[in-house]
Amino acid sequence: MRAAPSLLLVALLPLFGGCQMLNEKPVESTAGQTRMQGELTAAGGQLLFKPCSETRRFAITDGGSTGILQEAVALAATPGPLFADLRGNLGGSKVAGNDGQLDVQKLYRIEHSHNDCGDPNFKRLTVRAHGNEPDWDLKAGGKGMVLSRPGVPELAVPYLEEQLPDGRYTLSTEANGQRVDLWVAPQRCVDSMTGAVSHLSAELRVDGQAMRGCAYFGGARND
């Protein structure tokens, strides 16, 4: 992050004590809400959000009890820009110097990143999942899924999606002589290598071998 991590920690301390931790809630209407990606900074005791390719800054409030303030404080312990993908309600500024207020209703992910704003594939993805030890990365969209693993040829195949109770769902395929299933659940997930936080946990199964990881919805899916 451009400012020293300690400055972000200090700036957010007045807000941190009054926040609620992330918990699952009943499905609510998203009418009037906007999904946005951008950079988080701190100034004047506020967490500020600057959308990708914009100069406007919005003061963050956490009306959806997403835990975004706590997550920002935790990640600020490591230097580097903070990227956030979130959905909320935009409103007028209540503090001079800001361009408005963003009341966050859902946090899709928050992580250290220098280039997520320039991801050309984000808008076409329905979900992206990844894991470590062993490393794997799966991208799914309207034209199929692509599974990438070190030392293994990339697998690009069509898939079927099945909705399950409690917001869970699976993506599955048996193409090219392999059975691949991705199980996704609405549960806070922390990347074991980077500390990035996303709103979905994932389990990839390839011919019965299970590999755990995290996931988030791409720009083609906003629920």
Image (spheres, grey):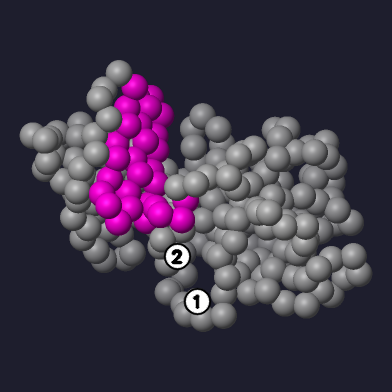
Name the amino acid, label 1. Answer: Thr
The answer to whether residue 10 is visible is yes
Picture coordinates of residue 216, whole percent (x, y): 44, 51
Q: Main secondary structure of the magenta part?
A: strand
Residue toward you, 13 or 181: 181
Residue 137 drawn above or below residue 171: above
Compared across the picture, whether 120 is left or right of 3 comes to left
- Mark number displayed over residue 30: 1
Residue 123 drawn above or below residue 92: above
- Mark number displayed over residue 222: 2
Task: Please identify the quadrant where the C terminus is shown.
Answer: bottom left
Which image quarter: residue 15?
bottom right
Query: Real-space Cα distance between discs 1 and 2?
Result: 9 Å
Of all residues, the one furthest to the left in this rendering is 177
- Residue drawn at x 78%, y 57% is 55
Residue toward you, 40 or 155: 155
Residue range of the region highlighted in magenta in the rendering: 122-150
Picture coordinates of residue 16, whole percent (x, y): 74, 56
Residue 76 falls within the magenta-colored stretch: no
Picture coordinates of residue 45, whole percent (x, y): 85, 56
